[in-house]
Image (tube, helix red, strand yellow):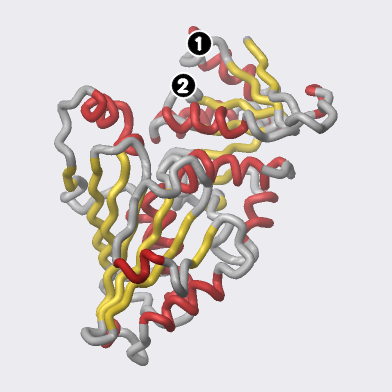
Amino acid sequence: MAVTTFARPSGGTADNPRTRPAIFIDGEAGTTGIEIRDRLAKVAGIAVRAIAPDSRKDPAARKALMAQVDLVVLCLPDEAAKEAVALADELGAEAPRILDASSAHRVSEGWTFGWPEMDATQPDAIAGSRRVSNPGCYATGGIALLRPLVEAKLVPADYPVTVNAVSGYSGGGRSMIESYTSGAAPLFELYGLGLEHKHVPELQKYSKLTRRPIFVPSVGNFRKGMLVSVPLHLDTLPGKPKARDLEAALATHYAGCKWVKVVTGDDPSLKTGRLDALALNDTNLLELRVFGNEKYGHAVLVARLDNLGKGASGAAVQNIGLMLGVET
């Protein structure tokens, strides 16, 4: 069993690894796990313990390592994540805290949703929870746009919402990644057209929608980057708000947030009506915009993020920091 610790950045004093909170990334060889490790390499104060490659599927070895750490991060398929939680539960009082990056527990009782910007109480809820579920990438953008407007009563909870989104192929799992990197996949495709996408339950629940939204995802031939959009007919909303009213509600909700920015004013994209899906890659940033046309009473809400950043690994590192009390 190998142990990897990351040194404090230059200019600081190295911590004693024995006093650092320790984590185990179960599924560290996957896309999300690799990105989490890379991001944690820039964070002082956390020891990352790694299991030998030939023991990654050995329940006894994984359970033994779980008993030695403060936090386990699950980067596994849903069923494997459930099995890992059951394995940890066998440790009883010695069980570590868990951050699950799969979709297995996002709407489950007893789990805290790991979206710190959801409301003012959420960071403390994450910090104090033993079980945290990392949000899905698409759901992160949709919830960020919709929840503040539902809470402000600008969008009714039973409004027939449609969410459209495009992602880089890295968010689609091993088979999708291989199809794109091999050149077998098309340049662009819609998918999830059975309207049963796994992000919909969390999108509905945490946006506070009582009506199930229609969600139409798509993937483009680029590795990472994401745009999530919600079109609205403003004259069907209570009080017939203007686009600037929606923008103001978003800006109020996210005022002072480190990682979420509501783009307003003279930003070029609001004038050109064009937006690059890849512009926030390799960051943990999330940008929100409201594009409006008063002549027709139309608006489109748009969230931009890195699907492997604020949409996955960046969000996980943010939650790790809250759970362990470490600045990330």
Secondary-structure class at tag 1: helix
Q: Indicate whether 173 appears above or below 210.
A: above
Q: Quadrant of the N terminus?
A: top right
For label 1, the crowd category at 10 Å Cα-Cα, with few meaning under 14, some 14 to 19 and many 20 or more, is: few
Q: Quadrant of residue 301?
A: bottom left
Identify the residue shown where x is 46% and y is 74%.
265
Read off the residue under disc 2: 29
Q: Quadrant of the C terminus?
A: top right
Q: Indicate whether 78 appears above or below 48.
A: below
For label 2, the crowd category at 10 Å Cα-Cα, with few meaning under 14, some 14 to 19 and many 20 or more, is: some
Type of the residue with mark 2? Ala
Type of the residue with mark 1? Pro
Q: Indicate whether 325 appears above or below 143.
A: above
| Left or right, 281 with reference to 271 | right
Read off the residue under disc 1: 53
Secondary-structure class at tag 2: loop
Identify the residue shown where x is 48% and y is 43%.
309
Q: Are marks 2 and 1 in contact (CB under 8 Å)?
A: yes
Q: Is residue 172 visible in this depiction of the protein?
A: yes
Q: Is residue 212 visible in this depiction of the protein?
A: no
Identify the residue shown where x is 81% and y is 32%.
11
Residue at the farthest bottom position? 239
Q: Where is residue 293? Give x, y as percent.
A: 27, 80
Q: Indicate whether 222 appears above or below 217.
A: above
Q: Where is residue 214? Give x, y as percent.
A: 24, 62
